[in-house]
């Protein structure tokens, strides 16, 4: 499936090198999604945009995202706030008449943006996600307090102070544990994570070359 | 029938009442619940957006730990429920992913052979126990309590699971049998904003305001939720919504298991009612004294 898709899309020689590189990275991600090839069958009906509860806050609507991908404008999609505003509620995915997994497509865009560090200005989402991953990799579980404290300190310490009353309120109801949760077999988890990362290096090398 | 319990990170902290009430309800219905030993993060949304394959692999560790026990996995958090189901489906449908995950788990002595069912507790109550059987065990009628049943997004989507994706009714049927009144609530599957409350609060506050408005306009005395993130967004941020939109919302937001537990005769304390930020005391007194 992938070879057909990549060939078909990459033959457009009007595309810049960067754009065609982004395109193959995107298609590689999409390939992993069962039914991912359906992205080619978009009829631009706008059901996704109409169903999206947060499209009002996006600078590129979900429908336009697919149109831009087709037109060879992936970089503008990556620079938009759209992929970060998607709250992953799957309303578009279940309604799409062409069966396109739009939410999973947004995830694919997010991962490419993360890898290449292409973000819209002043965007906090990737900071939050990266912290989340580092906490989970270390302890095996999310530690909400740890996550929000570090996120606040990193992005907006003033806002963090504004959150103190709510935190205190939750604490008084026993909803903020002081003892950090973690799994016992952290060694096993990190060996699994290391293994995924090392397999990736060996698997991906030939495809880059 | 025994179940393997996968609580998820939120049920250890902000959503302790969900954990407490779920355990109590299962106990009262004589359903065995065994917490999965040494479970790790499900690989939720935020992890998924950094590294999909890695998220699926750590998610699969949980499935591999649970499979030898041979019971269905109960995942009360909508996000855990979705991600664990998604991992199972990805492994089933994509041979390459299955092999890669298998290779990553093997050195740790783990493997997952696709034999699990991942279930939401609402599904278990309605389809394994059955509304009728639960109704027969009611000790305390919900006496016309007006509930807005809020399913949120990820419990019914993207998979076609135990309920309709546009208009689910399982929770409505359950509460009707317990003597409550389900108010008209057309926004029952609309997104609460999820983690946008932290990253784009302006967007999330608007979503929460719309939901609260819809519940209030239709005369709800409380909102019943099935998800930790929905619960905290709708409850803990009502103050901020009020400040931002000059509204006066004061609607208690409960986990559906708290209300089921109440009907089954459990004490409010055992169901975590003392952890509510918006008081439900008045109603609670009416219900428990009747």
Image (tube, helix red, strand yellow):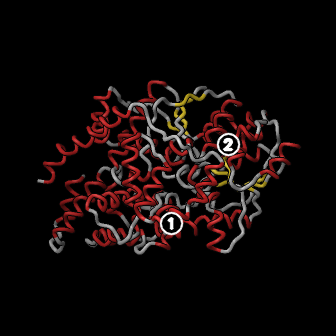
Tell me residue A77's x, y (percent). Answer: 33, 70
Tell me residue B114's x, y (percent). Answer: 41, 33
Front-lying residue, B239 or B21: B239
Tags 1 and 2 touching, CB below 8 Å: no
Q: Residue at x 75, y 59 (%)?
A: B220
Crowding at mark 2 (Cα within 10 Å: few <14, some 14-19, many 20+): many
Residue B257: assigned label = 2
> Would you say B22 lies left or right of A113 here?
right
> Would you say B225 lies left or right of B51 here?
right
Mark 1 and mark 2: Cα distance apart in space: 34 Å
Q: Residue at x 44, y 24 (%)?
A: B68
Instruction: Specify the subunit that label 1 lies on.
Output: A
Q: Is residue B281 above or below residue B184?
A: above
Q: Can residue A195 be seen from the camera position used here?
A: yes
Q: Can residue B174 be seen from the camera position used here?
A: no
Q: Looking at the image, is mark 1 or mark 2 nearer the viewer?
A: 1
Front-lying residue, A135 or B168: A135
Tell me residue A18's x, y (percent). Answer: 19, 68
Q: How many marks?
A: 2
Residue A159: assigned label = 1
Tell me residue A82's x, y (percent). Answer: 41, 68
Crowding at mark 1 (Cα within 10 Å: few <14, some 14-19, many 20+): few
Q: Is residue B219 above or below residue B11?
A: below
Judged from the image, the secondary structure of the residue bearing numbered disc 1 is helix
Judged from the image, the secondary structure of the residue bearing numbered disc 2 is helix
Front-lying residue, B192 or B199: B199
Q: Residue at x 16, y 66 (%)?
A: A11
Instruction: Specify the subunit that label 2 lies on.
Output: B
Which quadrant of the structure image shows residue B216?
bottom right
């Amino acid at each position: 499936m992938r070879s057909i898709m990549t060939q078909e899309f990459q033959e457009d020689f009007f595309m810049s090198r960067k754009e065609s590189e982004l395109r193959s990275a995107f298609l590689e991600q999409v390939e992993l999604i069962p039914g991912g090839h359906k992205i080619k069958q978009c009829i631009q009906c706008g059901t996704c945009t109409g169903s999206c509860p947060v499209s009002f806050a996006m600078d590129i609507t979900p429908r336009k995202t697919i149109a831009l991908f087709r037109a060879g404008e992936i970089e503008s999609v990556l620079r938009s706030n759209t992929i970060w505003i998607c709250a992953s509620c799957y309303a578009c995915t279940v309604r799409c008449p062409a069966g396109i997994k739009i939410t999973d497509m947004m995830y694919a865009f997010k991962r490419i943006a993360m890898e290449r560090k292409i973000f819209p200005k002043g965007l906090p989402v990737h900071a939050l996600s990266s912290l989340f991953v580092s906490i989970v990799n270390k302890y095996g579980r999310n530690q909400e307090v740890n996550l929000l404290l570090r996120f606040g300190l990193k992005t907006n310490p003033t806002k963090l102070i504004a959150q103190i009353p709510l935190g205190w309120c939750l604490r008084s109801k026993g909803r903020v544990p002081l003892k950090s949760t973690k799994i016992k077999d952290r060694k096993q988890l990190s060996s699994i994570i290391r293994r995924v990362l090392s397999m990736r290096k060996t698997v991906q090398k030939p495809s880059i070359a | 029938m025994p179940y393997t319990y996968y609580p998820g990170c939120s049920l250890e902290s902000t959503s302790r009442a969900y954990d407490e009430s779920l355990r109590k309800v299962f106990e009262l219905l004589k359903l065995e619940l065994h917490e999965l030993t040494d479970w790790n993060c499900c690989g939720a949304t935020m992890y998924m957006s950094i590294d999909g394959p890695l998220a699926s692999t750590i998610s699969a560790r949980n499935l591999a730990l649970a499979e030898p026990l041979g019971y269905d996995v109960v995942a009360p958090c909508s996000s855990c429920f979705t991600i664990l189901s998604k991992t199972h489906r990805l492994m089933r449908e994509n041979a390459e992913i299955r092999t890669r995950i298998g290779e990553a788990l093997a050195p740790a002595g783990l493997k997952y052979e696709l034999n699990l069912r991942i279930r939401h507790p609402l599904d278990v109550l309605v389809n394994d126990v059955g509304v009728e059987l639960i109704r027969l065990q009611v000790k305390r009628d919900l006496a016309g309590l007006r509930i807005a049943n809020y399913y949120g997004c990820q419990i019914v989507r993207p998979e076609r699971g135990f309920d309709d994706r546009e208009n689910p009714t399982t929770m409505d049927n359950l509460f009707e049998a317990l003597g409550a009144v389900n108010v008209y609530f057309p926004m029952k599957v609309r997104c609460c904003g999820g983690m946008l409350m932290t990253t784009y609060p302006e967007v999330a506050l608007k979503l929460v305001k719309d939901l609260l408005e819809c519940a209030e306009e239709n005369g709800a005395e409380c909102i019943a939720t099935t998800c930790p993130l929905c619960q905290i967004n709708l409850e803990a941020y009502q103050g901020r919504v009020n400040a931002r939109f000059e509204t006066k919302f004061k609607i208690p937001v409960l986990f559906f298991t708290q209300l089921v537990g109440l009907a089954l005769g459990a004490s409010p304390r055992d169901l975590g009612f003392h952890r509510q930020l918006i008081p439900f005391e008045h109603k609670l007194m009416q219900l428990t004294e009747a």
